[in-house]
Image (cartoon, grey):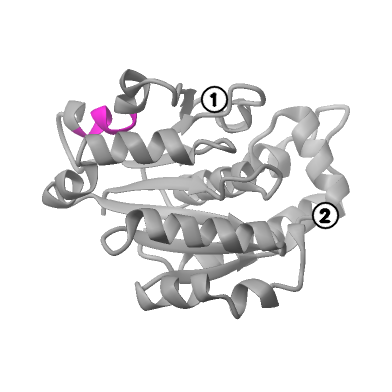
């Protein structure tokens, strides 16, 4: 199944890039081909950790955004690829203008390409309000995946009982929870600029993970993959 996956949440610090990296590693381990794009000019986190799969793209021009879907046209043989787009904070407005002006959703539907909007949420009210804006902007048509990032809070009652969540569920949204990876291990992975696979298997670096740290990353990946297995990706 070919898909265009927008990994968003609009606000900074909710873990969008971690979810993009997790989805990339999931596709790699499932031997599913994909192409990644990184819209964050300041950190380029996705490109740093998955440089063989992702490249930077600018969202402030239609020419830049067009790259996100041009890969579907340039694929010559075999199935169309999956695309992961790691959306930086405050990119919702230019993205929505581009999608509307390009009449993108009907075009991709005709091509048999599924559009998935991933809303990565923390436990705060901002994430609730931003989910409401996302649903209001696109309505029925795309798929919505709401990710409760347990590394950014544990009490999601505001989100669970919100009108935004009710509307999303009415539109067929899927809700998944991603657990927190041990903070010390994540810091080491970030310092190494390592993929999750590299972090588990690389033992030669001075800042390499120890045996139990590697085990915790493996366990986190296993549990996260179980959540992703429930999605039509």
Quadrant assignment, res 80:
top left
In the rendered structure, which segment of residues is drawn in magenta? 68-72
Near-viewer residue (232 or 95): 95
Q: Is residue 34 visible?
A: no
Which residue was labeled with disc 2?
182
| Residue 218, disc | none
Dominant secondary-structure state across the stretch colored magenta: helix
Near-viewer residue (27 or 143): 143
User: Does the magenta-highlighted stretch encompass residue 52?
Assistant: no
Quadrant assignment, res 123:
bottom right
For the C terminus, the image quarter is bottom left
Give the vertical position of 153 relative to 104 (above or below).
below
User: Which residue does the image show at 37% across and 53% down from the upper left?
Assistant: 137
User: Which residue does the image show at 40% across and 37% down from the upper left?
Assistant: 95
Farthest-out residue, left: 110
Neighbours of disc 2 within 10 Å: few (<14), some (14-19), many (20+)? few
Which residue was labeled with disc 1?
51
Tell me the element at label 1: loop
Quick one: label 1 or label 2, which is nearer the N terminus?
1
How much space separates mark 1 and mark 2, taking CA atoms? 24 Å
User: Which residue does the image show at 76% across and 29% down from the upper left?
Assistant: 192
Near-viewer residue (113 or 192): 113
| Image position, residue 63 (x, y; %) | 31, 19
User: Which residue does the image show at 27% across and 33% down from the upper left?
Assistant: 69
Tell me the element at label 2: loop
Q: Quick check: 36 left or right of 140?
A: right
Q: Is residue 58 visible?
A: yes
């Amino acid at each position: 199944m070919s898909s265009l996956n927008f990994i968003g949440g609009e606000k900074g610090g909710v873990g969008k890039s971690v979810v993009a990296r997790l989805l990339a590693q999931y596709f790699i381990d499932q031997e599913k081909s994909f192409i990644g794009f990184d819209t964050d000019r300041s950190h380029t986190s996705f490109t740093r950790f998955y440089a063989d799969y992702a490249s930077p793209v600018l969202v402030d021009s239609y020419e830049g955004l067009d790259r996100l879907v041009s890969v579907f046209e340039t694929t010559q043989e075999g199935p169309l690829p999956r695309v992961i787009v790691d959306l930086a904070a405050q990119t919702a407005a230019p993205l929505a203008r581009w999608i509307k002006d390009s009449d993108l959703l009907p075009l991709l539907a005709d091509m048999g390409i599924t559009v998935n909007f991933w809303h990565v949420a923390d436990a705060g009210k901002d994430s609730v309000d931003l989910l409401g804006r996302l649903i209001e902007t696109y309505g029925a048509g795309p798929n919505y995946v709401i990710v409760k990032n347990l590394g950014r809070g544990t009490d999601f009652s505001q989100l669970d009982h919100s009108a935004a969540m009710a509307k999303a569920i009415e539109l067929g949204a899927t809700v998944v929870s991603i657990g927190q990876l041990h903070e010390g291990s994540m810091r080491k992975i970030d310092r190494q600029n390592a993929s999750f696979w590299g972090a588990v298997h690389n033992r030669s670096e001075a800042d390499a993970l120890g045996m139990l740290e590697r085990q915790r990353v493996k366990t986190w990946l296993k549990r996260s993959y179980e959540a992703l297995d429930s999605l039509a990706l």
